Image (cartoon, rainbow, N blue to C red):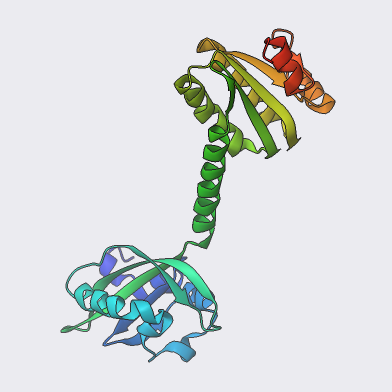
Amino acid sequence: MCDSISDIDYREVIEFSLDPVIIHTDYKILYINRAAEDLFRTDKQSVIGASPLDIFQESSKVAIKQRIQSAYQTPAAVIEETIYRMDKTTVMVELYCHPVMLGNNNKAIQTYIRDITTRKESEKKQDEMMKEINELSATIVPIMSDVAVLPLVGKIDFEKARMILEIIPEKVQAQKLNYVIIDFSGVYELDDIVINYLFKMKQVLSLLGVQSIITGLRPQLAIEATKLNINLSDIPTMSTVKEATVYLGVN
């Protein structure tokens, strides 16, 4: 039985790695593993001997070439790049490379490539959501010095509801409001978790000394709130924002 790490078949370890790996030296690819074949939509025979620079955009090649040269001495920092597959489609990846010995005297570069498309899409969605929430919070419409309307619109999912709960109380407090009319008339889709989150906002505002008034609550939303044991009896509920302003004595 062998228990020395030096007897492990290194090539087999890399071949079955889930992360795409390329090994190259002197700007010639020596080897790619199965995951790299899948990522680049190619096979080993088609890329062995090709330049690793070929997968990069022209605008990136000079910097990548310098990065490769420095990586012969010390591992390079992780970077993000857009690269080309063999079918000319592009993919956003994370790159990390470090030197490995090639025989006794020479060195090669081992590059790990990770597809970050899903992560980037998630980050983009998060950024767009934050922008939307910030715009929403900026549209707390003051109608008197201490009264404002918060118009909720569109589809509100869990993340959006969570951010509303975090951001709106701060905005309300900053504007020194005593009353907030939360208008649901523009909301067309909510689920149970989201409904629960939004009605928690009433409790948070109450702790800040701000009274909430709900308007535009559709029958279905009211039914769902009741199913969740949310008590609407202590929240003034009106059909329209106009009714709420009359209730508050605002002309």
Q: Nearer the viewer, residue 188 or 53?
A: 188
**Quadrant containing the C terminus in the rendered view:** top right
Name the spot of residue 131 as percent of width and height, x first.
Answer: 52, 44
Residue found 29% across the figure and 80% down from its top = 62
Query: Residue 120 location, x and y as percent?
Result: 49, 57
Picture quadrant where residue 66 is located = bottom left
View extreme (front): residue? 251
Q: Is residue 243 visible?
A: yes
Q: Measuring from the top left, give residue 143's x and y in whole percent.
A: 61, 22
Asked whether 87 or 109 is in front, the reply is 87
What is the count of numbered marks?
0
For this view, does 216 lie left or right of residue 178?
Answer: right
Please, which residue is most extreme toward the top here?
234
Is 76 placed left or right of 45 in the picture?
left
Above or below, 3 relative to 122:
below
Residue plotted at (41% across, 89% down): 48
